[in-house]
Image (cartoon, helix red, strand yellow):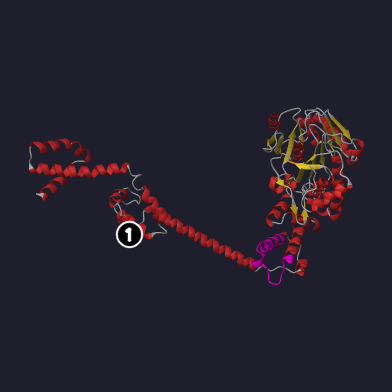
Amino acid sequence: MPKIVTKKVKKVGKKRSADDMAGEDAPVVEKMATNGSVPVAKKSKKLVKKKKVIKPKRVLAKEEPEIPTPKKKVALFEQDGDDDEAEGLDEAADDDFDTFDNDDFSGDSDSSDEDDGDDGLLPVEKKSKKLDQKAAADKRLADEELQLNIADSETYHLPTSDELDSALKTDLNALKGRISDVMQVLGDFKKRKEPGRSRSEYVDVLHKDLCSYYGYNEYLMERFMNLFPIGTELIEFLDANDVQRPVTIRTNTMKTRRGELARALINRGMNVDPAAKWTKVGLVVYDSQVPVGATPEYLAGHYTLQGLNSLLPVMALAPQPNEVVLDMCAAPGGKTGHIAALMKNTGTVFANDASLPRGRAVVGNLHRLGVNNAVVSNLDGRMFPKVYRQGFDRILLDAPCSGTGVIWKDESVKMSRDKIDIQRRWTLQRELILAAIDSIDAKSKTGGYLVYSTCSVLVEENEAVVNYVLKKRHCKLVDTGLEIGVEGFVNFRENRFHPSLKLTRRYYPHVHNIDGFFVAKIKKLSNKKMDEKKEDEGENEAEQGNGGVEA
């Protein structure tokens, strides 16, 4: 009997499709109930059995993401560390994985059971394992390449002084290669140094090569090497000094707004964009079809050519309307115009410069910008305490300096700045900052502030000068209110400055893409000078690291 039933089922399967059989399920069941013949009963029983096989497959297909998910995660995360558990995964819940294997992951549903049984891993797991093996091989090759590079650097021969003298200093490629090699040796000196050579020998060779490659004198390069002890940062700084900064302009808010000015300049053929997030008046000029300093908007005083670094000290000064403000070194007048704009052309702005020709340029710029609350003077800044003692609410001192932050503007700085020149400059700066403090009224209701700034990056002209005035006068450093900038030095080599010098801000061309700059904001606390005894006590306290500032 079973043989007869099997033949009939095969004939039905060949002649009828699965949909036809599903549609005739009900009539077949009726025949079983009424006639009771054996062949029909066996046939309907077989058809019912096929229905049981089809239904679970459809139900499991819908629930496919839920059944294998927990066991799949366990296999993927633990296949490298626990082989036994991975092998037992196929033995547990065979029925579930039988239905899971029916889904075509490998492209051949018939062979998936055999592959999983042999390897104990799912196809996804196999691919993951291959990726892990490839990543390990890549890492091994990278490590081998690194060891080869280290081995090459270990065999580097440091040239002697005679070899350096005989070598051509005009061969820039050879100089650059030697600079890179010496920096690598200094980065891991114990392992890469040549036997019998000291660190100072490598530093001397690097010092001479940097001077030859970038065109600096030895004194200035030594200052920069002390300022940037990390070799990569030093190279970035030196490279940035040879790159021209972007052309920037400042909107004159007394005559127009930045958006209106930008639209007008774009119509003139300029490609401009807002300069930075921290300024609301600056614009960057990428290229222009017309001269930037000869447009009708420029001649009408809607804007002035001014670097972004020149905006910083005026923003830190924050002059208020109806105040009396002094710009002690005002030429060519860009910062004075900015001060007048922030004061909304009220109060009084004294624009002073010790150079008469430069003072004439200040007059022309202030007229063009529409400033009518300014008084232009030609006086040595050190004379103001005698002429107008304690007569100002706020003072901006953009002191004359070495210009080591704007070397790209004047290449002669590389060779002309030596120890004597720098000493003369910081001596003048100390005299000017004392005169500025003495000219401020500490009892001012809204002011009493001095902003000291330079376009230099040397510590001798910046932190050392501010630390000097903290010891000589009743004043303290306050926050500049600037969003960007690097904190000033508190400890620099053998120098120990007042802890509040971290409130000052430094700007570097390779970090901020503006000229090198320094800004400090000082609050005057008393109009009385410190007597000689207090000055000596203040110097002793400063040496002990306890201060020198009286609250």
- Check the image and report above or below for 71 versus 180: above
Local secondary structure at mark 1: helix
Instruction: Pinpoint residue 82: horizontal percent, then vertical percent.
Output: 39, 59
Residue at image mark 1: 118
In this view of the protein, which residue sits in the foreground, 51 or 291? Answer: 51
* Residue 486 spot, x, y in % from top left: 70, 46
Magenta segment's dominant SS is helix
Residue 424 position, x and y percent, is 87, 50
The amino acid pointed to by label 1 is: Asp
Left or right: residue 431 compared with residue 253? right
User: Is residue 170 shown to the viewer in this render?
Assistant: no
What segment carries the magenta color?
175-201
Q: Is residue 146 visible?
A: yes
Residue 80 position by quadrant: bottom left
Residue 86 on the magenta span: no
Q: Position of residue 72 (x, y in %)?
A: 37, 51
Query: Dot 1, crowdedness within 10 Å: few (<14), some or many (≥20)?
Result: few
